[in-house]
Amino acid sequence: MSETHHNLLADGAPVTKLPEDPAVAELADHGRERFLDIVCAYPQSSLCWALLAEGSLNMESRDGDVAAYAYARTGYHRGLDQLRRNGWKGSGIVPWEHEPNRGFLKSLWALAIAAHRIGEDDEYERCAQFLRDSSPTGYDVLSAERPVARGTGNSGVGDGTDEQMDEVIEEAGERQTSSPMSGQLRDDREAEVAAEDEPSDHVLDSPYAG
């Protein structure tokens, strides 16, 4: 895959901007002491699942990698649901600069990393390319924060969790790279998108729709 990003906005590619994530304010106010309660209250929040995935990746273990894959895939699919509801047709720009998009983009990169770690290389390639196509800036930021190579970058095991939650609390919209907790995937996740929110045939034709 090419590492060169061209200006997709200049090409007239459609841009999708998600609405504000209500979980962000809850994380800012109560993220340290009530994180799992917030996840349960806002299971549609890609950011919550991304934080869980990133915390699991920080475990640097097979158990953590598998948990991260499940968390990240949940956040990815919840993000796809929201993108479709906001006009996304299977391609186009999902700009990192629009902060409510970051939960989805972070879930997408966490899924790429987890897939790579468990040996699902074709899924890693698909997710990495999807991120490049959707947000070159997001790809640059996230791949610098958490490179594919294990144990490199700014997200070492157990490092910076408190500081990064401080960033969430202080900025409310700023997404960081470590989870305030990690643990077993909860059994009571919400069902997949309701029938009325199912994608159109055009969306299903996209290589990124699933």
Image (spheres, rainbow, N blue to C red):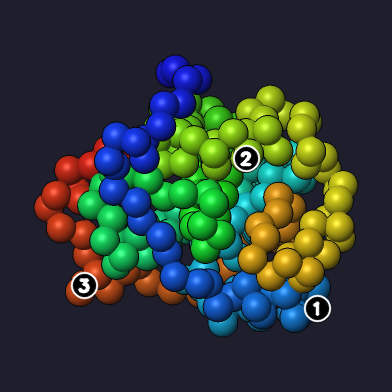
On screen, residue 34 versus residue 122, left or right, reads: right
Callout 3 touching callout 1 (CB < 8 Å): no
- For this rendering, which residue is in front, 41 or 129? 129
Distance from the alpha carbon under mark 3 to that under mark 2: 33 Å
Q: Is residue 94 left or right of residue 54?
A: left
Extreme-front residue of the structure: 10
Q: Earlier in the sequence, mark 2 or mark 1?
A: 1
Image mark for residue 195:
3
Q: Nearer the viewer, residue 23 or 172?
A: 172
Label 1 belongs to which residue? Answer: 33
Farthest-out residue, left: 201
Which element carries disc 3, helix, strand or loop? helix
Depicted 133 relative to depicted 77: above or below = above
Circle nearer the viewer, 2 or 1: 2
Mark 2 closeness class: few <14, some 14–19, many ≥20 residues within 10 Å: many
Give the Cα separation between the discs numbered 3 and 1.
Answer: 35 Å
Q: Point out the frontmost of discs 3 and 2.
A: 2
